[in-house]
Amino acid sequence: GQNIDQPTEMTATEGAIVQINCTYQTSGFNGLFWYQQHAGEAPTFLSYNVLDGLEEKGRFSSFLSRSKGYSYLLLKELQMKDSASYLCAVEPYNFNKFYFGSGTKLNVKP
Amino acid sequence: EAGVTQFPSHSVIEKGQTVTLRCDPISGHDNLYWYRRVMGKEIKFLLHFVKESKQDESGMPNNRFLAERTGGTYSTLKVQPAELEDSGVYFCASSQDRITNTEAFFGQGTRLTVV
């Protein structure tokens, strides 16, 4: 099977920075994805990393280290609307499907 | 442009009954995927269509589940007969190309409750 681990829940303050970690142990690796999901809504794409390093997209950045099987999602200048679940997903080999972690529920408080 | 739409949004059925879930992908997306999230667990892959062909159905739990995509447009997922453990949220996603080449878009999901 594929082991993808991320914290269950995190709490941060509006305006702050939060880092959500994801570790994975998969048979082969073809890319790592982060999705955001508000309660009752569709997961929406945030980022995709295939090479080591940092990908920045506005207030959100995602980092990947393939040798360590590690990624993180960095959210800056937190807003209340960032309260959601953040899903880490991996595509092993060339399977063209996601293997998801259980998701991290982020609570942003005033 | 409409996103991925799923119907119904909620379904409550009794054990032993049949339920059919529908997914309308984004127009022009050849790739259609079904995923499921059982309570307290991660979202898990069920199967993948390319147009009307089943590319990968390795995640289908058992033969009570039947997925179709006639004509390569919308897809249905039928559960017959439903069991208690089938309760969960069923997500559909679509993409124009492979998920590493193009973005995969998800629907809001169908929450299935089997009582």
Image: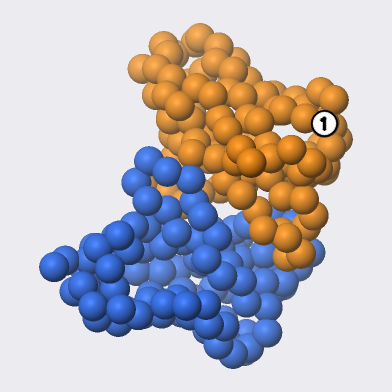
Chain colours: A blue, B orange
> Residue placed at 59% from the left, 18% from the top?
B20
Label 1 crowd (10 A; few <14 / some 14-19 / many >=20): some
Give residue B77's quadrant in the image. Answer: top right
Q: Relative to the observer, which residue lies in front, B97 or A96?
A: B97
Q: Nearer the viewer, residue A21 or A4?
A: A21
Relative to B73, does residue A38 appear above or below in the rendering? below
Residue in the image at 55% along x and 12% along y: B18
Q: Chain of mark 1?
A: B
- Which residue does the image show at 45% across and 59% down from the upper left? A36
Which corner quadrant of the image does residue B50 belong to?
top right
Q: Position of residue B7 (x, y in %)?
A: 54, 24
- Which residue position holds label 1? B72
Q: Give the side of residue A106 with respect to residue B27, left or right.
A: left
Count of numbered labels shown in the rendering: 1
> Identity of the amino acid at label 1?
Gly
Q: Quadrant of the C terminus of chain A?
A: bottom left
Q: Is residue A103 left or right of residue A97?
A: left
**Farthest residue toward the front?**
B1
Expressed as whole percent of the image width and height from the top left, the position of residue B47 reads 70, 41
